[in-house]
Image: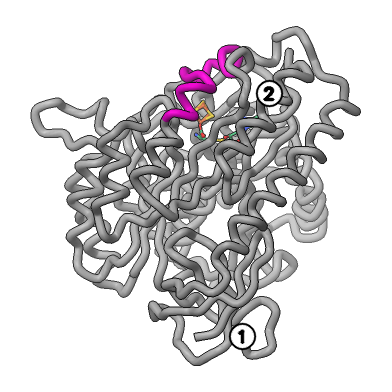
Amino acid sequence: MATYFLATFGCQMNEHDSERIRGVLEEHGWSAASKADAADLLVYNTCAVRESAENRLRGRLGEASRRKKEQPASLVALGGCFAQSRGEKIFAELPFLDVAFGPQNIAELPSLLAAAASGSGPAYAFEDNQFPSAGLPTRRLDPFRAWVQVMTGCTNFCSYCVVPFVRGPERSRPAGDIITEVKRLAGEGVREVTLLGQNVNAYGLDLDPSSRLDFAGLLAQLDGIEGIKRIRFTTSHPKDLDRRLIEAIRDLPSVCEQLHLPVQSGSSFILGRMNRGYTREEYLEKVDQLYEAVPGLALTTDLIIGFPGEREEDFYRTTTLVRECRFDGAFTFAFSSRPGTDAAGLPGRVPEAAVKRRMREIVTLVQEIAAEKNSSLVGREMEVLVEGGSRHGGGQLRGRTRTNKIVNFTGKADPGMIVDVRIESATSTTLSGRR
Ligand code: SAM
Ligand code: SF4
């Protein structure tokens, strides 16, 4: 049987697309190889959000080019956002490539591979298909937790971001399809679902008004599904976060007390240049409402440091916003100029030394606050969904709280069980305890 090796770069959306790539390949007779060396087919599911992702990919492509020289009959396929951003030109850039496909063309992968294997030259597909991936087989690596795509694409055009260019316009998947999928997953033993979209708070706005649900309405429908104990979702856009969603988090038992709400900057001036559609004050007001409605909420965010025009005072505003919001964690990214986006043409590039210093400062601050917040949980009993053995070994188990914090703990439990764990110590990123 022919074997494949798949490497994934980028976000959860790409991880989920990779589950479909595996599903589609395995349905067509391919089986997974544990190492790239041993595989007949190498697939790279790529990311183009930051230059660093592209650089990491280039590092890996050396292995593909070498393999192709040693074994000309092997195949190399490149999918995802980086492939889409290059289009057909990718074959001139990477001559050893056999197949290229966009994030919306996963279903075509087997036929593209067959065409390339027949010796008729490189094969590719980059069309913008309407809800292409719904209904594709998926091959999940986690038996108890699953991703469910509720939307595709993005139409927000934040000035720094390539996503709208590579994943097409924002489109919602019909609620009925989502509900059917979640019921099926529950039947397979899944206990936790994470609903995925670039801006889930805008779910349904593009659907027929006579029959549509908004995102809070969708959550209410999913909340009743037997077997599903936890519902998470990502990503929320602050401009579309409304009262109804806050109440859904407060009132629906399976919706977890956790929210990822990327702010990007604490300066309204920079937020305007980013085309984010909200001010610092509006963001802070929503965070106040969230903490008031949902005590114990874990709030995380994304921050971009060194956006063009970011002055010292703008960065200072980001630090004060981080203090006020008391985030449980933050992904901090140095601004990366992406060809074709509006921000690539903006004046005011921040010197690298200043970006580095600001990055260090913000990372330290985020860690301090996260460590304080986690220490306040010591002594509490928390509900943990068991994932398996702890990465630290030593017979410890690992799981996650409803607030999405990793817990390493001693005691007996099987993966998939939901147990109470007493928290005994904490760092900025993990909790430890005993059941
Ligand atoms: N749709 C989500 C949102 O609006 O929050 C995020 C999608 S994006 C794939 C994930 C994160 O990458 C963004 O929140 C942003 O912080 C970061 N990002 C996107 N483009 C970037 C760029 N050009 N430079 C640095 N960070 C970037
Ligand atoms: Fe990119 Fe903004 Fe869309 Fe998020 S909302 S995917 S940051 S354009």
Q: Residue at x 29, y 49 (%)?
A: 250
Q: Residues within 10 Å of mark 1 (few under 14, many from 20)?
A: some
Q: Nearer the viewer, residue 316 or 71?
A: 316
**Would the CB of label 2 be found within 8 Å of ligand 1?**
yes
Locate residue 431, reporting x and y percent.
60, 69
Compared across the picture, whether 203 is left or right of 14 comes to left
Residue 334 drawn above or below residue 137: above
**Image quarter hosting the N terminus:** bottom right
284 is within the stretch colored magenta? yes
Circle 2 residue: 338
Rendering quarter of residue 359: top right
Nearer mark to the viewer, of 1 and 2: 1
Residue extent of the magenta highlight: 271-285
Circle 1 residue: 396
Q: Nearer the viewer, residue 425 or 109?
A: 425
Compared across the picture, whether 324 is left or right of 92 comes to left
